[in-house]
Amino acid sequence: MKFLKYKDPESDFSPLFNRTAFPEDIERSVAEILSDIRKDGDEAVIKYAKKFDNLELSPDTLKVSQAEIDNAENLIDQDIKDAIQLAHANISDFSKQNLPEDWSYNPRPGVRLGEKFTPLQRIACYIPGGTAPLVSTVLHTATMAQAAGVPEIVITTKGAEDGSVNPAILYAAKVCGATEVYKMGGVYAVGALAYGTVSIKKVDKIVGPGNAYVTAAKKQVYGYTALDLVAGPSEIMVIADKTAPASFIAADLLSQAEHGSGFEQAVLVSDSAEILKNVESEVLKQKALLSRAECIDKVVDNGIFMIEVKDMDEAAEVATSYAAEHLEIMTENPEKVSENVKAAGAIFLGPWTPEPLGDFVAGPSHVLPTGGSAHYFNGLTVNQFFRRTSLVKYEKEALAKEVDAMSAFAKAEGLDAHGRSGTIRFD
């Protein structure tokens, strides 16, 4: 753990504020894999499934069978099925509150303007399945597509070495209305879905989080398909004052450190030096009790930061600069502190709102911007599963009033045909 003091010239904040989701060495290796997928299609997919996941696949076995999907619910405990159903209901309800609606108005006589919203035809949800099978990510992506009315919902996730797929992921996929599930993970899955192969139809959009390699792959296929946002290794920042329980804070920091890539960050910001020291002790104590302590050890030395600030105004300033994927505010008046935070993927208010509620059951999607990209990206929402189309209609009299302005723009830009398309209607 690293202890820092805000605005102290001796404190090195570069690992925090200069982090990136796209390391150059990763970018290069990702580009090579994507080039192979684009050129060789199924052959390259099968090659990389063997190389990275030790999976023996063929074009016929890339796709999970309907029988395997139907049988999945017999292989998982009832409490997991109940949790999946609860999360699906909550996410679906939240999504339906924000469904876009077609609209139009008459701004001027003879002119009608508006927008219409059409669900995307075919989307893919990338579900991490490496160090932890993220069942919840199925729900936090596909449920929104389902609520939007997307007819083709593709799930892709890493298969096990025996060719099976985690049954809880398959059950969640069925609950969310997924129409296809593929045994693919990592960069080669992103490439196959973006470019398409003989066996895998390309998609309109890829959504979902992933490690640094998946994030870089999504960036590089932009243009062949649409994307949601930059969602790489997890991070959490907690703003706390002296009223916050140190045990709660430590548990929440560890909840994100355990993801396992080693690139995660967990940051505590407080105006109480005592809280910072108490949380350090709690982190070490609680870490020893956790099953994924080995994953957490990758993060403790270089990814957990304790930052002392003068007051809550400074805390909000740090939070805005950092632009955390997840921001918890455990203070006497968390709403007031949050008003001064200008960038964060999601904000969790008060001591009874642990961030993993957002990961699992709260309602808003847990697919959130990381690496500081919350400065310019939003989290995944149901709106992102629609095409927005402008609607423009002019009557003859309305065109007559504005055709001269249209012609003037065409003249200024040297585009004669543009102007003539208006004036010819009155010749």
Image: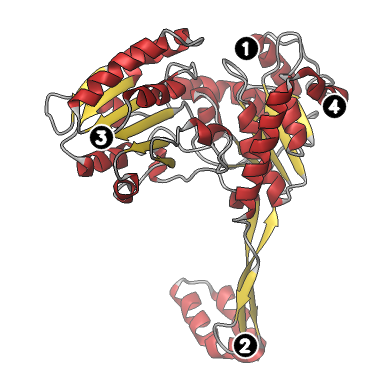
Q: Is residue 324 visible?
A: no
Residue 347 image point, x, y percent: 41, 42
User: Label 2: which residue?
Assistant: 110
Closer to viewer: mark 4 or mark 3: 3
Q: Gap in Å between the C-alphas at discs 3 and 1?
A: 45 Å
Q: What percent of the width, then of the height, locates residue 184?
A: 69, 22
Q: Is residue 264 left or right of residue 310?
A: right
Rendered residue at 29%/49% (across/down)? 340
C-alpha separation, residue under disc 2 versus residue under disc 3: 60 Å
Cβ atoms under marks 3 and 1 closer than 8 Å: no
Camera sees residue 98: yes
Q: Which mark is nearer the camera, 4 or 2?
A: 4
Q: Secondary structure at mark 1?
A: helix
Look at mark 1 in the image and give the residue it sits on.
Answer: 52
Question: Which one is in front, 372 or 78?
Answer: 78
Q: Are marks 4 and 2 in contact (CB under 8 Å)?
A: no
Circle 3 residues within 10 Å: few <14, some 14–19, many ≥20: many
Kindly identify the residue that appears in the image at 64 percent across and 85 percent down: 424
